Image: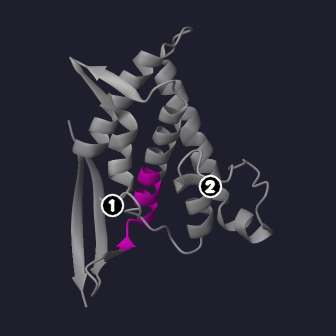
Amino acid sequence: ESHFFGPLVVLDEPDGSLSLIDGQQRITSAVMLLCIIRDKISSFETDSVRVGEMLIPLASQVNALLYKPNMKATRFVPNYQIQEVFSQYILASPGAPDRKTLRKKGGGMSETEKRVTKELRTSYFRMNEKLDEWLQNNSEEVHEDDQKQQIYSLIGSLQNAFEVLTITVYT
């Protein structure tokens, strides 16, 4: 079943890229969820899930959504106010030397960064908590393979079940 993500208004830039005019918060939330899923996958002993006879690498599936085909540049550039924090604390891959640890109260951030990222940090930790609750599925004993199956299903939904109305503004 599909989910209507809502309209996105984009500006068609001369270099072929698109600048998001309306829908930034929804896109930021979706990208943040993908990063949280990626981070959860990195905590597993292996990142592969068995689907039938095949082993599917979950991290590769998420990275294909986060990065352009060259796997160097991200598909998403955050709003200028949160760009540095989002890139260093959320978008950077786990284990990357420049990845910083996000803290609920903004430890390690300037007062300005704390102020402009308060809602972002709140959303990040809430999403993390909700993903963990969903993966535990009200079960006392949680198996990594079951969590991987759930994540595989969630990634599939994110890849295939979102309907977006894109409105392009040309200059």
Looking at the image, residue 47 sits to the left or right of residue 39; the answer is left
The rendered magenta stretch, by its main secondary structure, is classed as helix
Q: Position of residue 90 (x, y in %)?
A: 57, 53
Q: Is residue 99 visible?
A: yes
- Residue 70's mark? 1
Q: Position of residue 113 (x, y in %)?
A: 71, 67
Q: Is residue 161 visible?
A: no
Give above or below for 150 relative to 70: above
Q: Position of residue 37 (x, y in %)?
A: 46, 39
Q: Residue at x 47, y 33 (%)?
A: 41
The residue range painted magenta reads: 20-31
Q: Is residue 32 magenta?
A: no
Circle 1: element type: loop
For the residues labelled 2 and 1, the Cα–Cα distance comes to 22 Å
Q: Nearer the viewer, mark 2 or mark 1?
A: 1
View extreme (top): residue: 141
Q: Amino acid at mark 2?
A: Tyr
Circle 2: element type: helix
Q: Amino acid at mark 1?
A: Asn
Chosen colour scheme? one colour
Q: Residue at x 35, y 22 (%)?
A: 149
View extreme (bottom): residue: 171
Give above or below for 103 relative to 21: above
Q: Residue at x 37, y 71 (%)?
A: 22
How many other residues sit within 10 Å of disc 1, few (<14), some (14-19) or many (≥20)? few
Q: Position of residue 80 (x, y in %)?
A: 54, 75
Q: Residue at x 36, y 73 (%)?
A: 20
Quarter holding the C terminus?
Answer: bottom left
Q: Which residue is under mark 2?
A: 89
Give above or below for 43 relative to 95: above
